[in-house]
Image (tube, grey):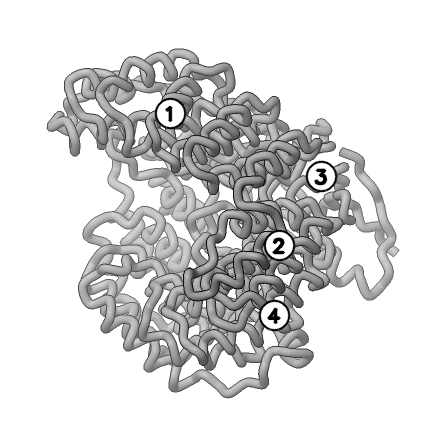
Amino acid sequence: MRVETQLLPTPDTRVLVGSPIAWPRGAEFDEIARLEDARDTSGRLQQLLEHADARVRARACLALGRCPNLPGAPRAEPPIGPLLCARLADADIGVRASAAFALGLRAEAGSGPILASLIPAASDIEVRARLVEAASRHDDEFARSAVLAALQDPDPRVRVEAALGIARWKRDLPGGEAADQALIAALANRQRAAAPGGAAGAAANETLDFEAASLFALSRRSSPLGRAAFLTGAQSSNPLARIFAMKGLATLATDAEIGATLQLALNDLDWRVACEAALALEARPTEGATAALSRSIEHASSHVRRAAALALPRCVERASAQSRELAVQGVERALRDVSPAVRGGALIARTRLDLLEPSDAEPQARQSTRTLAPARSAHDHLREWMRAADPHLRVAAATASALLPAPEAVTLLAELTSDEHPLVAGAAIEELGKLGTPEALSIVRAALVGADDGVRLAAVMALGEAANPQDVPLLEQALTLASGEIEPEIAFNTARLLGRIGGEEARRLCLALAAHEDAYVRSVARSTCFERFDVPEDGPPAAPISAPPAEPRLERPARNPLVRIDTTRGSLVFELYPAECPLHVHSFLTKARAGFYEDTPFHRVVPDFVVQGGDARGDGNGGASWRGDSLRNEFTPRKFARGTLGMPRNDNPDSGGSQIFITHRATPHLDGRYTAFGDLRAGADVLDRLEIGDRILAIVELRVASR
């Protein structure tokens, strides 16, 4: 990684200068970072809760909150929960807020009522907001009641946390409908009439206000009671509210009014809103949407063009011949698009149209669909795409192949499982698992003992409900063959699979996994043994004691560092947060300085969600930390907003590595569940243009020269 000193223009200097950092005095910060990294809860972190420096106490609270509370793990001494609860009465506001957040991360039984009781009396807004957030993470009746009451809090920040808290609750929770009603009532009191999305809407300030947070919660809960709120939100001046309104409408049964709203939103000047409208039309096809979607094939954003192409076949399944012809023409244009992502989506759409049989009521439509290709020609057409140079087009061919009748689908997917790129082979295995035929599952089982761990992981996941006692020897062999950074994920998913299979051999192998060197694998295996095989919680073999990780030499810069990520679409500038996420920042900068990220791809792009890259394998399964292991989580109260730089992980919260993701918008369901270690400071237009297959060219550390 190069280091560049830049004398930035005066207007930009205000933005492109990292914030100053107030480090705790002495060496306590480094000590806390080391103890947290080692997951050492034997007493020293608890002692630091009594430190004279409030910043040390707050940081110790956060570290204890991040230490996982896993089944089968050694119990912390002294216990963490009561000590954090005691810090809720700390004289320092920052310590109280940090303790509340930490209690939410741990969600230990018994702390929910304590959090709930403190919310009404908390005079500081930040503390009250963190208490509400923490209470929402507890499965506790008192905590839920306190969160609902916070919907009427006088401060908007607290009301937002209450709305986001409701989004975390299970949909089938007792009283769930009452929670939706309370949220809708609070929203109705504050939801302002806004101009339709357009020039004014696109220029509006993008904030996660109460309206947007409430619509997010209702959409996450798929609440049928949210219909009126979604329709009103579709006209908001806040782009986030419009986005979440589209997501909410996608969960409802469509009618003429919803259909018209979605079609109108395809013209929104914010591409994310238009994209969500197209995705909603794919999920909930509406009559008359074909013409609007066909026009969206010409949209400036490739994300919208792809979504429109995928939605077109869904909207013409029982449509007129004219609508079918429009869909055919739109998909044909998308097949010639400059964007590989659009062409891949169009291939899937074309295959659906190829196989679409017109309704018997409209025999005249049959000739229209044949202008694209005879239904049985899809097999030969897909073979051409299977030879494409771009692996992401071959992935699209795998997805499209799975749409064919089972014998043909299995033939094509079987060939793709031998693809040289693990992304393609893994996608083919995933599709074979979904097909679930004996022939398809036979190929999946063969991949369990193949040569690539990423494909092996895909096979474990694809086997799923089809696994049976005869698979246990194959799974045991797969575990023997697995090694390196993907092996723990193979192991804990195998433990879950063994629980589904049952039987003495599955029990034996699961007991062996309960002594795995990885703490999360041990936890999953122990839970499976206890829940499925009637093994007492203290029955599995004792967990081995892992050697402590190498201690990093953490830098303590005066300001947050700035880095520029140069991509094939342009450059993005990020501010990093070493005081909040010291290990993640250290690992990212160390690997960047070694040139690790140069020419690595963006292997995953989910429009209006994230762009993900930094995996040298290119399939999302690779990438360790700077020292070759996994990064422990460093969750913080910082929210995921537009352009937040985050760390991907699997089900294990402590499974970060080299990969990165960047959010297209606020993503509240990631808050407190993924590590946010940076934010975008320049290059939002580049972020919007990034597509799957684009690459990181270089990462440059910036130094701002003084005048």
Give the x, y percent position of residue 368: 59, 59
Instruction: Calculate the distance from the C-alpha at mark 2 to the C-alpha at mark 1.
Output: 32 Å
Do tag 2 and tag 4 residues touch (Cβ < 8 Å)?
A: no
Is 243 placed above or below 411 here? below
Could you tell which of marks 3 and 2 lies nearer the N-terminus? Answer: 2
Amino acid bearing label 2: Arg
Give the x, y percent position of residue 102: 37, 50
Do tag 2 and tag 1 residues touch (Cβ < 8 Å)?
A: no
Badge 1 element: helix
Could you tell which of marks 2 and 1 lies nearer the N-terminus? Answer: 2
Badge 4 element: helix
Residue that carries the numbered disc 2 in the rendered image? 306
Q: Quadrant of the C terminus?
A: bottom right
Could you tell which of marks 1 and 3 lies nearer the N-terminus? Answer: 1
Instruction: Calculate the distance from the C-alpha at mark 2 to the C-alpha at mark 4.
Output: 16 Å
Q: Quadrant of the N terminus?
A: top right
Amino acid bearing label 3: Arg
Q: Is residue 139 left or right of residue 572?
A: left
Amino acid bearing label 1: Glu
Please state which of the two labelled residues, at mark 3 or mark 4, is closer to the viewer.
Answer: 4
* Res 9 quadrant in image: bottom right
Residue that carries the numbered disc 3 in the rendered image? 695
Residue that carries the numbered disc 4 in the rendered image? 291
Q: Which mark is residue 439?
A: 1
Badge 2 element: helix
- Between residue 329 and residue 248, name the one nearer to us: 329
Q: Residue at x 38, y 36 (%)?
A: 435
Instruction: Calculate the distance from the C-alpha at mark 1 to the C-alpha at mark 3.
Output: 37 Å
Q: Please tell me how crowded label 3 is: few (under 14), some (14-19), or many (20+) other residues with Cα within 10 Å.
A: many
